[in-house]
Image (tube, grey):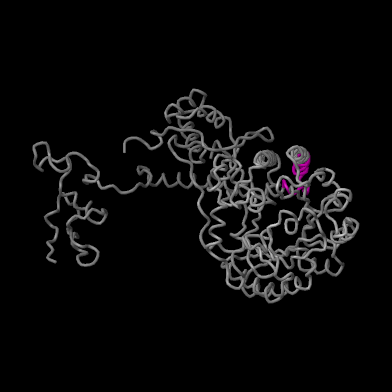
Amino acid sequence: MTATISGTRTYRLGEFHQFEGGGRTFVYVVHAGAIFELDEAAETLIRLARNGGTAHESLVNDLTTSGLTIADAEELVEEMYHSHLLVDSESAPARLENPPAGFPLQSMVMNLTNQCNLSCEYCYEFGADKVATPEGKPKFMDLETAKASVDFLMQSAVSRSAVQITFFGGETLMNFPLLKQVVTYASEQAAAHGKRIDYSLTTNATLLTPAIIDFLAEHKIGVTVSMDGPPDLHDKLRVFANGKGSYDIIAPKVKLLIEKHRTRAITARVTMTSGVTDVVRIFRHLKQDLGFHEVGFAPVTTSPDRLYSIGEKGMDGVLNQFHALAEEWLEYALRGEMHGFSNVSETIAELVQGVNKSHPCGAGLGLVGVGPSGDIAPCHRFVDSDQHAMGHVSTGIDAAKQADFLDRGHVNSKYECSTCWARPLCAGGCHHEAFVRYGDTGHANLHYCDWIRDWTDTCLKIYGTVSALNPGFLEQFAERKAL
Amino acid sequence: MKHLRAINKKARRIDDQLELSKSKDDVMALQTAQRPHVPMGCTLSFSPGWEVDSSGGTAGLCMPAERDIYDCYVTCFWPAQVPDHLNNYPDWASKCATATKDWRNLDLVFP
């Protein structure tokens, strides 16, 4: 070999997103989900290689004229090449691999019942866009099915050291007796299998009692309350069957929950709809007046023509308010305090790891939903839907249906995503949302692309700033949920 | 890395990988990255001068024909007529360390 390999290369820039924070420059490497801070020389190199087709030698020459020694220039080019910030001119972008076959299960969402005591108009389980076909199926899960579900989880988790059960509904607490039995049984089974087990619960809070709260606290069950803000906003759509709002019923119960349940963070989950987009006011109320530890927001999942769907203009307003809260989050972080706006915290946690997703979420992969009948669905949002069922807890996952779901949902099969720099985190977005909007779980959620890119950029800037000014703060996000 | 500072876990893994490959380079200074094995002088690689020399004989080949034996044996898939070294004649070439010099020491094999 006479020439070194690098000497014969010509380069173009790899796929990355450049951003600033705390007075420094960073790049988010799309190939990997990695984040690097650049020094001045690296920034110069990016400017020099911008037009592509740059031969190795001329790049090194240009760098030396800008003040680097040859050895330093070579080293810089090698570092940039190794990090995929520079790539071979001829190279094709690397395709993301499939997750390994037989991926072990980590989480199970158990729909203890598909019945609910509220009649929220936007509900994806009962509303106009529902995918569930519950006719003729059990309305409440029985103990036998619940035990079979736990057994299925333990078996399918194979060698994982920790598993998670999330109780869901309908209104979960309408089947609280079963919840208690499942916790007892699953804790025994987990101990027998040498696994750690973790529980959480989503509820509308209407049925909370002091006894239930004690039980949740005692068993360290994480609680998420679906709540849309102060009474005038909450009561718009979160109503009982007679149209009466549910705020007055739940507010005292929620306060009691937060006061007495101290073993886990208590989270509020807000569904934004037309007219319920006053993000800052909702956040203040839930965080400061009621005392939730974390508050997360998501726009309602709906086809675009529903009255309660948020139009494009509405979403712009939402994003502006998200930015205001994001700035606050950053101020808190620089002081070393948690702010409680989940939409930032959760993205930061993913950025700490540098996730690079083949699929938008764990649905059908490390997570499944189980309906009252024991039917397995990709996640809780598809529970009780005949079209999306993929097996039964007694017989396991239907491999062919699972493969079809995962093939569709893989980011490689979403053409629009192939040039988007935000795909390591988004991977095309929620399977269920895609199905409701486009009739295909594997369709990219094109209606919120700009929104996702803007939000990812915002969170990257926060990440960069914190890493520059208060790096220790990021460590608390480093714990991995999946073990 | 000197010019890039890794600030998340994935970036640190990329950094570690580069450091690791550097430390390997120290040991194998003259080696290049691992590539698929292509036998030198094999007909598959179409190198001129392998089959006949300029006068049409084999005396002046750019590589001695004898050295080719080890490229058709063990490392190459080309079905050269060499004994089966896997099962029946494992020691067939044990006395021949350098084919160009010792080829006369190769055992005759009578299957």
Of residues A353 and B23, the one drawn nearer to the viewer in this rendering: A353
The correct choice, above or below, for A157 with respect to A406 in the image is below
Q: Quadrant of residue A279?
A: top right
Q: Residue B85 appears at what percent x and percent y?
A: 22, 62
Residue at 23 percent of width and 53 percent of height: B78
Principal secondary structure, stretch drawn in magenta: helix
> Which stretch is magenta?
A324-344
Q: Quadrant of the N terminus of chain A?
A: top left
Q: In percent of the image, x 25 and y 43: which residue is there?
A: B45
Q: How many marks?
A: 0
Which residue: 51% across, 54% down? A98
Q: Quadrant of the C terminus of chain A?
A: bottom right
Q: Give yes or no for residue A336 being in the magenta stretch.
A: yes
Q: Horizontal and vertical percent for residue B70?
A: 21, 53
Is A256 on the left or on the right of A354, as rendered? Answer: right
> Could you say which quadrant of the image residue A248 lies in?
bottom right
Relative depth, front residue between A301 and A97: A301
Q: Give x and y (percent) for residue A259.
A: 86, 60
Q: Would you say residue A92 sits in the magenta stretch? A: no
Position of residue A298 measured from the top left corner of the image (x, y, whole percent): 74, 48
Task: Specify whether A425 is left or right of A114.
Answer: left
> Can residue A434 be seen by looking at this rendering?
yes
Relative to residue A22, is residue A233 drawn left or right?
A: right
Can residue A337 be seen by looking at this rendering? no
Q: Quadrant of residue A16?
A: top right
Q: Is residue A327 left or right of residue A41?
A: right
Name the residue furthest top.
Answer: A65
